[in-house]
């Protein structure tokens, strides 16, 4: 395990493979396990570093006055919807099918959710307004608005599983920022100078 030799909790180690941050669930894995999960034809650059960041502010997901999703939360949840939704030949727009919903749940929990799962059935019973077996983007956003009201830990868990922190910033954004800072510091670092006589 990556964090074991340093006696550091796995949540405090960032594992990076080819400039992409791997989720926290892989921090307590062996490199062989990660290689199997993310096969690549040639071995990329790997490194692990301690996560050092200032504590994040906890973002608001629901507007306290209107009870609607704030803009940043809508952007994140809409991007998830677009990743798992498909177009239908007889309808305009994207729709989430039972398979797409199962794939989405699996992406959050990694539990191999199937379209026949009770959670998928419950989503469609509760949020499929016209009972056509397809969820619209607004249905999906309403699912998150209602879940944030009734069970906010589920929403925060899904955000974490998809690489977002409590400030609704992507961990990939954090990595890009840290790498940019490191590049800037390297450019400013004084290089050895030689005097030839």
Image (cartoon, rainbow, N blue to C red):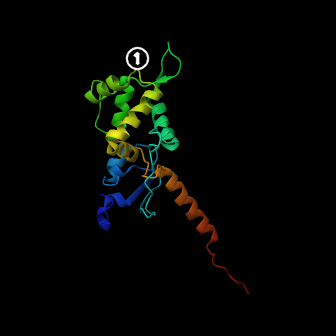
Could you say which is closer to the camera, residue 47 or residue 13? Answer: 13
Work out whether residue 181 or residue 105 is closer to the camera in this orientation and state it.
105
Taking depth in this image into account, of 139 and 178 the one nearest to the observer is 139
Residue located 48% across and 17% down the image = 88
Vertically, is 128 above or below 148? above
| Horizontal arrangement in the rendering, residue 114 relative to residue 55 (left or right) | left
Q: Where does residue 118 sit, x and y in percent of width and height?
A: 26, 27
Q: Label 1 crowding class (10 Å Cα cut-off): few <14, some 14-19, many 20+?
A: few
Say which element carries label 1.
Answer: loop
> Residue 193 location, x and y as percent?
67, 79
Image coordinates for residue 72, horizontal then vertical, percent: 51, 43
Q: Which residue is mark 1?
A: 130
In the rendered image of this protein, does residue 26 appear above or below residue 136? below
Furthest residue toward front: 65
Q: Residue furthest top?
A: 90
Q: Nearer the viewer, residue 136 or 66?
A: 66
Residue 85, quarter of picture: top left
Residue 51 visible in the shown view: yes
């Amino acid at each position: 395990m990556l964090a074991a030799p340093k006696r550091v909790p796995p949540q405090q180690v960032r594992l990076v493979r080819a400039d992409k941050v791997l989720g926290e669930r892989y921090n307590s894995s062996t490199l062989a396990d990660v290689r199997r999960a993310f096969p690549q034809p040639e071995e990329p650059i790997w490194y692990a570093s301690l996560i050092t960041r200032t504590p994040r502010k906890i973002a608001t997901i629901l507007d306290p006055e209107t009870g609607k999703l704030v803009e940043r939360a809508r952007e994140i949840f809409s991007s998830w919807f677009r990743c798992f939704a498909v177009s239908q030949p007889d309808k305009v727009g994207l729709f989430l099918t039972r398979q797409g919903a199962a794939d989405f749940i699996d992406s959050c929990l990694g539990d191999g959710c199937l379209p026949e799962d009770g959670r998928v059935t419950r989503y469609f019973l509760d949020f499929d307004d016209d009972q056509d077996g397809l969820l619209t983007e607004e249905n999906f956003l309403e699912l998150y608005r209602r879940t944030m009201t009734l069970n906010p830990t589920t929403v925060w868990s899904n955000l974490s599983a998809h690489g977002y922190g409590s400030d609704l910033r992507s961990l990939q954004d954090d990595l890009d920022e840290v790498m940019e800072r490191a590049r800037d510091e390297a450019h400013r670092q004084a290089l050895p100078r030689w005097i030839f006589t």
